[in-house]
Image (cartoon, rainbow, N blue to C red):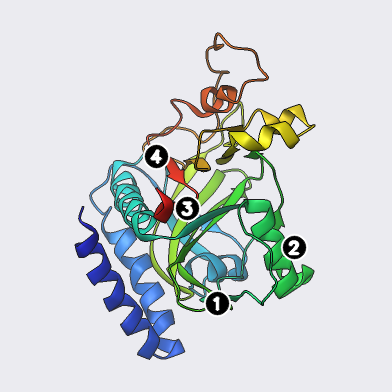
Amino acid sequence: MSSARRSSAAFTVVEVIATISLSAVFLTSAALVYQNITANARSLASLEPITLDTATFQNLLGVEQATLSVYSAPNHGRGAFAGNLAEMFLDDVAVASAVYCLGRDGLNALRPTTIAYPAGSGPLDTPERFLAHLVAQYGAAQTSQFVSYRGRSMAQDLTIMLLQPSASATQLRLLSIYEMDVVPVTGLGNYVAVRRYVDGALTSYYDVLFPTGTGNAFTPAAVHFYRRALARFETDAAVSKYMIAEEHPFYLIWWPDPAARTLEAPVDPPVPTVANTNAVWDYYRMGGRTRFFFAVPAFPSQQ
């Protein structure tokens, strides 16, 4: 997957999105939903009518519907869509200047194209500092869905904001935003939607219904590892164990796998041969639950 191929496609999307009307944006979102459904027309997996409030589907997929037919896991057709989205994500990471994983509890409506960075603003070298900056710029009301964390995020939902290089000293420019939402559906299980947004518009996604399971929830979806040098200043052992990066901070990120039978881990993973104070326990907790696992530098342009 070449960066040149990816960049050409992305600029075309941006140019189109910049010129179409709001009604066309809605039609584009509806077309994406239709494309996702028809692509699995020959799947043997069952289609389930999922009923949520209209505002939820409007927020997630940009469609004014309260009920949507969704394929139930395991479904390899949905897995193919997940693979395409994973490729887009890795291509975006390759040209991003910074990656910020934000834990979230509830729907997100904050999908900016730029973020003000006034003179005198501090460094945004960790996800918690980036979140604090968002709160300062947009206020508590617009950012209340985000959950601050240090090390691992145990929030069920996730927003990943990717910044791109910018010549402006007072503005941060968004390259793309990825979101993962897990929405419980009474009597059916968990509806999962993972999406990509560019300039605030939905460009690609996959979704699937995971039947009700038992065991551990799909957490942590993201773990942030700090530079090792910071450990000498940290007094909290629960955080210092994540300060192991030699030079560059990075994330471990997991997305739900539509080809898996359940979202929850049915049993605890094998016990690793290290103390449970070691950060490798998070890897063991999520290991084997999905094939969509990413090791992502926090600042790719510095690698």
- Residue occupying image coordinates x 37% and y 45%: 46
Residue contact between numbered discs 4 and 2, judged by CB atoms under 8 Å: no
Q: First in sequence, mark 4 or 2: give its number.
A: 2
Residue 182 appears in the picture as rendered: yes
Mark 3 vs mark 1, CA separation in Å: 18 Å
N-term mark: 3 or 1: 1
Residue 104: tell me if it is visible. no
In the rendered image, residue 286, in percent from the top left (x then y), is placed at 52, 29
Mark 2 or mark 3: which is in front? 3
In the rendered image, which residue does mark 3 sit on? 299
Mark 2 packing: few (<14 Cα in 10 Å), some, or many (20+)?
few
The disc labelled 2 sits on which kind of residue?
Answer: Ser
Q: Nearer the viewer, mark 1 or mark 4?
A: 1
The amino acid pointed to by label 1 is Ala
Distance from Cα at disc 1 to Cα at disc 4: 35 Å
Residue 144 is labelled as: 2
Q: Secondary structure at mark 4?
A: loop
Residue at the far top in the pictured view? 273
Q: Which mark is residue 200?
A: none
Question: Identity of the amino acid at label 4?
Answer: Phe
Label 2 residue SS: loop
